[in-house]
Image (cartoon, grey):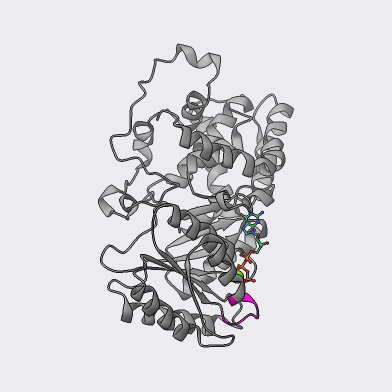
Amino acid sequence: MGIFSKLKKMFGGAEEEKEEKVVEETLETEEEIDDETLEDSEIEDEEEEETIEEDDIDEEIEIEPLTEEKKEKVKIYDKGLSKSRGGFVSKLQDLTRRYSKINEDYFDELEEILIMADVGVNTVMELIEKLKKRVNDDKITDPEELKEVLVDEMFIIYVNDEILTNKIHFNDKDISVILFVGVNGVGKTTTIAKIASKLKKDNKKVMLVAGDTFRAGAVEQLREWSERVGTSFYGGGEKDDPSSVLYDGIVKAKEEGCDVVLVDTAGRLQNKVNLMHELEKMNNVISKLVDGGCSETLLVIDATTGQNGISQAKAFKEITNITGIVLTKMDGTAKGGIVLAIKSEVGIPVKYIGLGEKEEDLVSFDIENYIYGLFKDMI
Ligand SMILES: Nc1nc2c(ncn2[C@@H]2O[C@H](COP(=O)(O)OP(=O)(O)OP(=O)(O)O)[C@@H](O)[C@H]2O)c(=O)[nH]1
Ligand SMILES: [Mg+2]
């Protein structure tokens, strides 16, 4: 069963599904990943990660019962992706309505819609290629039917042959240090506050360290967030060396018995070489003080910047070891396709997605919720 049919069943399904044999609702045998709470069970465990081969995808998809928590999460995706539904997805629906048969013109238009939706040129080419093959192999002529195949293929592009993980790696031997990097204004500081609040709810003792000493006011902004959320805080003076602030911050966090240190950094260093050296220095400080070194380096990207965001991801990937991406302001774009471009053009997992300005509007990235949030009107 493809993702389209699965979502259809999960979220109330349509009548025509009745004739299909009843699929038993199986509880996940594996411990269900609780996206909202970052529990110890979320500590990244290589063995828990699953690699999915294309051929295996049908068997791997299971229907989970919808818990209240999952319903809440779906609501956040639903609300946060409404602009994309009104933009990108409604264009797809319109295309389906206008064509009664699939032909070259249909594919040309589809290609344009996907490119305009930030899916990324290479990913679009791959997707169109696959769709043409499916049309040929399965003798599909109706755009209505192809719409379902498109959703399935988008899912496959995201999960195919990859290690699926949205989990944050916590250090089980020592304090966990998470660096947040990204160009100015993308949402680093806000994201740190949102994640700190989640960790706090999960009874973790958190310290925020103001490594952005470049911009006047950045230290104060993070201090205010730490007070609002109720975490420890360490910040040096303006123009202090970020690495020395980080050093003192980690020492203080250890003294206070903190579990996690979230580090804000400046994204506006004049050039790549400077930024690379700065991040290298920070990583050396962490390695010196923390057994196992840095737990995660999360790159924050503003979804509304489209292909520019993809270029940022590629550039940061060259200068430091990015372990995950936080895609902010998804609620502010009508394009919605950037997730696929990041996955296939940058190859770094999206770990969190920002779907609004409120504290709870940052959620662990979940491809099924994302696809449902985008395509719910078509399902
Ligand atoms: N709508 C929306 N706004 C967001 C989201 N995440 C962050 N923002 C807003 O984006 C703006 C910039 O956020 P900051 O957290 O200050 O960004 P930053 O990367 O720390 O910026 P600098 O410190 O200037 O480099 C703020 O107004 C945030 O409220 C999101 O997911 N959705
Ligand atoms: Mg900031």
Pick the quarter of the image with the N terminus: top left
Residue 361 appears in the rendering:
yes
Residue 246 occupies quadrant: bottom left
* Highlighted magenta segment, given as a residue range: 213-219
Indicate the position of residue 163 as horizontal and vertical percent values: 36, 51
**Side of 26 where 222 appears, left or right:** right
Q: Residue furthest top?
A: 19
Query: Residue at point 55% right, 63% down?
Result: 300
Of residues 78 and 375, the one nearer the viewer is 78
Magenta span dominant secondary structure:
loop
Q: Tell me if residue 93 comes above or below residue 279 in the rendering.
A: above
Of residues 322 and 287, the one nearer the viewer is 287
Q: How many marks?
A: 0
Of residues 170 and 96, the one nearer the viewer is 170
Q: Is residue 30 magenta?
A: no
Query: Residue at point 65% right, 81% down?
Result: 216
Query: Residue at point 48% right, 13% down?
Result: 18
Indicate the position of residue 330 as horizontal and vertical percent values: 62, 51
Q: Tell me if residue 321 comes above or below residue 130 in the rendering.
A: below
**Side of 57 where 292 appears, left or right:** left
Query: Residue at point 63% right, 44% down?
Result: 80
Of residues 284 and 237, the one nearer the viewer is 237
Q: Residue furthest bottom?
A: 240
Which quarter of the rendered image does ligand 2 occupy?
A: bottom right
Q: Is residue 214 magenta?
A: yes
Residue 108 appears in the rendering:
no
Pick the quarter of the image with the C terminus: top right
Indicate the position of residue 249 as horizontal and vertical percent values: 43, 78
Indicate the position of residue 13 as horizontal and vertical percent values: 53, 21
